[in-house]
Image (cartoon, rainbow, N blue to C red):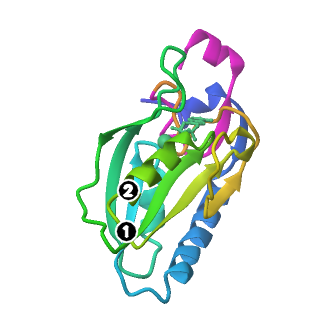
Amino acid sequence: MFKKREYLKNIEEILISKRQINKKIQEAAKWIDQTYENHDEEIVLVGLLKGCIPFVGQLVTQIERNVVLDFMVVSSFKGKEKAQGKPEIVTHINTDIKDKHVLLVEDIVDSGYTIKYVKDELMKQKPKSIKIITLLDKPTGRKVDLDVDYSCFIIPHKFIVGFGLDYKEKCRNYEFIGVLKKEVIEKGDL
Ligand code: IMP
Ligand code: MG
């Protein structure tokens, strides 16, 4: 048996608590209902896997109007060996978005390369509109000209984990957003 929240030992600092996340997601759902209030066309939420899962999962249950949910898998190529800023769509949506309103749901926007690329690709399918909502936004990291329509939290330029965000595929299950201890990253000891 695991001790309660065993992963707390990896954390230097909790940046955003579970309670703060819950509150912001409620507000974000209200923003969605208000934004599309006078639109009769279908709303398609497109989550970018895997980071979006806790965010979109919680968000979608609090939206009061009808929405459709779909997902994409996009690789961001953050590694040193690969050229930065060349994302690739690994799995595409199945939904026909022509003349519909698309809301892209991201875990975090940093340079903006990933989400801008996805937006430009989806534009080719002639949706009525595309907006972007993100749980976290690091505006100081931005490398492209991009409008994020709704950011739940603006955060400083730090590497963070939890609530969907990973370090080497771990930490996605943390109920808060936090900063890993340096020694944990150095040792890769998670
Ligand atoms: P961008 O293309 O630079 O905007 O990067 C976006 C993607 O990089 C996100 O969808 C995340 O998967 C990843 N990412 C950026 N910053 C962080 C972070 O601080 N922690 C974990 N993943 C991050
Ligand atoms: Mg992501």
Q: Is residue 152 left or right of residue 37?
A: right
Residue at image x 53%, y 28%?
167
Query: Which quarter shows the N terminus?
Result: top left
For this rendering, which residue is in front, 74 or 21?
A: 74
Going from the N terminus, do you reach mark 2 or mark 1 first?
2
Residue 35 pos. (x, y %) = 55, 79
- Disc 1 marks a residue whose amino acid type is Pro
User: Label 1: how many residues lie within 10 Å, few (<14), some (14-19) or many (20+)?
Assistant: some
Magenta run includes residue 166: no
* Marks 2,1: beta carbons within 8 A: yes
Residue at image x 68%, y 33%?
179
For this rendering, which residue is in front, 144 or 1?
A: 144
Residue at image x 51%, y 20%?
79
Residue 115 pos. (x, y %) = 51, 48
Q: Is residue 139 above or below residue 30?
A: above
Residue at image x 48%, y 89%?
38
Q: Which residues are magenta?
A: 169-190
- Quadrant of the rendered image holding ligand 1: top right
How many numbered discs?
2
User: What is the spatial separation of the Cα atoms under label 2 and label 1, in whole angstroms?
Assistant: 8 Å
Q: Secondary structure at mark 1?
A: loop
Work out which residue is located at the far top of the displayed protein and give it: 187
Using the image, tell me which numbered label, if any, was put on residue 122.
2
In this view of the protein, can residue 164 be seen by the observer?
no
Magenta run includes residue 176: yes
Using the image, tell me which numbered label, if any, was put on residue 127.
1
